[in-house]
Image (spheres, grey):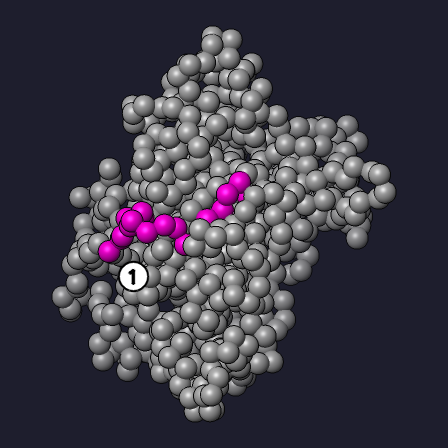
Amino acid sequence: MSMEEVIPPVRVATAEQHGSDTLIEVTGLHADYGFGEGSVHAVVDVDLTLHRGEVLGLAGESGSGKSTLAYAITRLLRPPGIITAGRVRFRESVDLMSATEHELRGLRWNEIAVVLQSSMNALNPVLRIGTQFADVLRAHQPGIRQTAMRQRSEELLEMVGIPADRLHSYPHELSGGMRQRVMIATALALDPAVVIMDEPTTALDVVTQREILQELTALRDRLGFAVLFISHDLSLLVEIADSIAVMYAGRLVERGPANAVYRAPRHPYSLGLLNSFPPLHGPRRTMEGIPGSPPDLRTPPSGCAFHPRCRYTFDKCQAGPHPPLLAVDAGSRAAACWLQDGTRTVPDELALEVFS
Amino acid sequence: MSEQHPAAGGEPEMRPVSVSGNGRGPVLEAKGLTKHFPVHRARLGAKVPVVHAVEDVTLALPAAGIIAIVGESGSGKSTLARLLARLIKPTAGTVLLDGKPAVAGRRYARAVQLVLQDPFASLNPVHSVRYHLARPLQVHGLADGADQKGLDGLVTGLLERVALTPADQFITKYPHELSGGQRQRVAIARALAVQPRVLLADEPVSMLDVSIRLGVLNLLADLRARDGLAILYVTHDIASARYLADVITVMYAGQVVESGPAAVLTDEPAHPYTQLLLSAAPDPDRAAPPSLAGRGAPPNLIRPPAGCRFHPRCPHAMAVCEQAAPPTFALSAAHSSACWLHALDLTADQSRPLQGRDRTSGHEPPQGPGEEKQPSTPNAST
């Protein structure tokens, strides 16, 4: 597939001009798979903000809707997936939900780049790495000179720790880790403000994963892009993210600074999830994880979607509506749990001080 | 040691962990187990290059003990599990069951069962749970004389052992009607059907959702505590190995590099590769980003590096590491490491750091109890 077609960059007011650092603002986003009765609500009423230079970790199990959310934000969701409600604004000026296909193409890659889990398999096996870089650069920067293109490609590869002569290699000549690095380099080719990464290191060995994460952090510090980092591995997110949003059955159940969510979770699901990762230090003790399994979204439980697995559940959880994200800790964070509505005694383990 | 998880809701209870070596000999042993896979079929007179997948692995699994085999992809850990299951023939070395050379066959299969990683692939989609569990009972003659009702009773008992209750609800289900965790429990129940004494579990939880992994790990711990099942737990996740196992054995490029009691090995790793693995593992309690000592990737196993297979990546590599494979040094009764850094009698020429390696971290053993460090035979379990 060639990308000879030229995509003009869309002029977007920069953050400096606006005096704000909000890059992506998601409000009330809903996404379904299928229409009408049989439809599955994969993303329900999600509010999320990504700031400039921030690493936002989105945690959730398979089927929690975290990838659907990423696709919906970038308008990459394909049928039968449909966005049914909500607003996504980029840099407080562009409405991504009403943007035309033409506008979107200008934004994607230039401003918002995406790296997917299996994206190391997204490289074209019959083209050299250099050719694939050139495709991207030519499509988005029409009229770019051959030498400039070459220079930029070499720079990009070296940026992710791969020798520049690998531009002549074919994808099968690179290891999985190197291919994933190439995908990260292509995502950064046009200096985007936002990089959305969906389980970018999950398929890799732990040492390679760590190397890539360290490179990514260094690049973020140097280039200042923001990252929406999607992963099932909450313990990893705690290490690399500035803030964390936890999803369960299509909804955000907790949102807050990474350290606070780790030290003092406010939602029973976050607490259970954190207790599902055996620690590398300290005395060995029995851990319980979370009983039951994630719900089938075709037949979601009544009330709070987590109540069948929750050990703190009471009548309102089952009968009442799904709890909204309630502000806790003076609004610095939020949790979607009726325990946090201010009228109840919160169990000690869900009311820990953040700095103790 | 660092503190307990701050979010853990109290009541720290120790799982009863029987220390391995309970007087009785090991149930299952590997002695110098080696597997070389030819890269292609041999042509007449031609020497076929081989992949050195598993090289000279010796370990002993005691009754009611849990050994974790930890390694990255390509380290040979799954090949080792298959060798122990006698699904593939070793190039060299022996497998001993109760101290006697094991013969592949039905009797061996009754004693040693394998549980695979992917419960979506290891169950037959056209058969019910009842069929999956009744079949091994019939094949191994464990349900002889039982009528349909008696057979169902045995199957129900198996389902209850893996906590799939109410069992009469699960017995008629098909794999697609079960969640990943439930499928893996059925796969474990199927292995338990023949009353094995050893369970070889090859990455049994890595395909499962995070929140249900612990449930399956706890099930394995229960089976050991309740029924005295010995378990070989193969995993890439060293944190879960620390959680479940008595002994962790770390493999790199087909060889065992370090073996020791789970908590000791993770708290005080002796081999540079184990240290690398631990520094790369996710750890929210880490104060500062880890520094990785030993970047790069595992070697090509068709032509593995001479000497120590880790030396091209090792920050402490010395001249001797290029020349000779390190013997296994006993650091304590149960802790051993195959690294030249533990040798005390190296000449100045042998301990010369390789070019480009950090002299400052030179010849000091990376850590380690100061006990006598003498070469010993590999000593994986006792």
Residue closest to the far right: B44
> Could you tell me if residue B152 is visible in this image?
yes
> Label 1 amino acid?
Ala
**Camera-nearest residue between B140 and B173:** B140
Q: Could you say where residue A272 lies in the image, as x and y percent from the top left?
A: 31, 61
Question: What segment carries the magenta color?
Answer: B16-33
Q: On the picture, is B332 further left or further right than B131?
A: left
- Provide the residue designation for mark 1: B225
Q: Residues within 10 Å of mark 1 (few under 14, many from 20)?
A: some
Q: On the picture, is A150 further left or further right than A180?
A: right
- Relative to residue B363, is residue B18 depicted above or below? below
Residue closest to the far top: B348
> Could you tell me if residue A144 is visible in this image?
no
- Relative to residue A346, is residue A217 depicted above or below? above
Q: Could you say where residue B153 lies in the image, as x and y percent from the top left?
A: 40, 85
Q: Please report the residue visible at 27 percent of the width from the left and 76 percent of the height from the top.
A: A317
* Image mark 1: chain: B
Residue B25 shown in magenta? yes
Quadrant where the image shows the N terminus of chain B: top left
Q: Please report the residue visible at 54 percent of the width from the left and 15 percent of the height from the top.
A: B319
Q: Could you say where residue A195 lies in the image, as x and y percent from the top left?
A: 54, 46
Instruction: Name the quadrant containing residue B371.
Output: top left
